[in-house]
Amino acid sequence: MSQQQVNALKPLRPDAFTSPYRDPVWDGPTDPILVPDQLTGEWVLFYTQRRATVPGLTGVEWVHGTAIGVARSSDGGRSWRYQGTVGGLVPPETEQPATLWAPDVVRIGERWIMYLTVLGGVRTDWTGTASIVQFASHDLVTWEYLGAVDLDSPRVIDAAVALCGDGRYRLWYKDEAHGSNTYSAVSDTPQDPSSWVLEGLTIPGRPHEGPKVFQLEGTYWMIVDEWRGQAVYRSENAAGGWVRQEHLGGLILTQPEHVGGRPVVGRHADVVLLPAGEDGRERALLVYFTHPHWGGEDIDTMAPDPKTRLSHVRAALLEVRGGNLVCDEP
């Protein structure tokens, strides 16, 4: 890749998503993941395309049968162009129509690796086998199926992968068959789905989902979605020893919006480092989704009003102050 191609990328703006991103098809984008495309100089947004406005669906049918939507930005995240859905993400022998959830996309070596939750079929309740599978791409457009990750559980979702301080890659995920807590696996060759070795329980206690691990100001951080805000944990090397932040009960994004006088919580988030500021401090963009017409608690408490299903993608500035991870909620 030439230096000209690398330099073509527009820096990610601290005010990205000032106008929240809405999916133009079903108006239900969730689980955002944001990556730079050095080949085109654009930022690419992948997300779960929930079928929020499809009429006549019962139960949680609207969060099944979902594809992975994609949008692109050529101005550092200020505006977004919908690009359709990503093709080729249904593994062989998957029951149709397939349900695709919560991708994580990580640059490893010369390729992009996508870690994706796949369920076969469409259901009105939270049943069925859920697996995490891997794909690879050179251009963020065409994806090659690599295989499924064996995590010794019938219901694993929400993959997050990062290189840890011990030089090894870890995969964190929600195990719904074991308390809906965060578990982890480790690998030295994360491109190979068969290489992951289970480590076990990482974040116990209150059920949660959507882990994300990143490094900021020399510390490794993990955020998880507790359906009342994002819970914050820290670790010296991300290989273990996670400790919950005490500041503000260990929660951020507890009320980035309000509806009917009640707070709306920030849900399943991604974190992307920003260019260094003039003061030399590291900051990041916290990219998340909300339900603007509903508080965002446990989905089973959602009111029957169809507009409560609607969602959009927003962002907030994330930084470390006084040793605590904090964000400025819009």
Image (cartoon, rainbow, N blue to C red):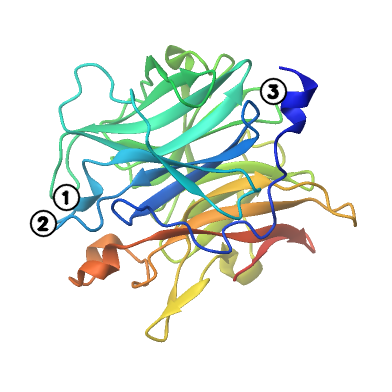
As displayed, is residue 169 above or below residue 210?
A: above
Q: Is residue 34 above or below residue 300?
A: above
The residues bearing labels 2 and 1 have C-alpha atoms spaced at a distance of 6 Å
Is residue 221 visible in the rendered image? The answer is no
User: Where in the figure is residue 264, as x and y percent of width and height?
Assistant: 43, 72
The secondary element bearing badge 3 is classed as: loop
Q: Residue at x 30, y 50 (%)?
A: 25
Which image quarter: residue 214?
top right
Instruction: Determine whether label 2 and label 3 are within 8 Å by CB.
Output: no
Report the disc number at residue 167. Answer: 3
Q: Which mark is drawn over residue 58?
A: 2
- 107 sits left or right of 21 in the view: right
The residue type indicated by label 2 comes to Thr
Q: Secondary structure at mark 2?
A: loop
Inter-mark Cα distance, 2 to 3:
46 Å
* Mark number displayed over residue 61: 1
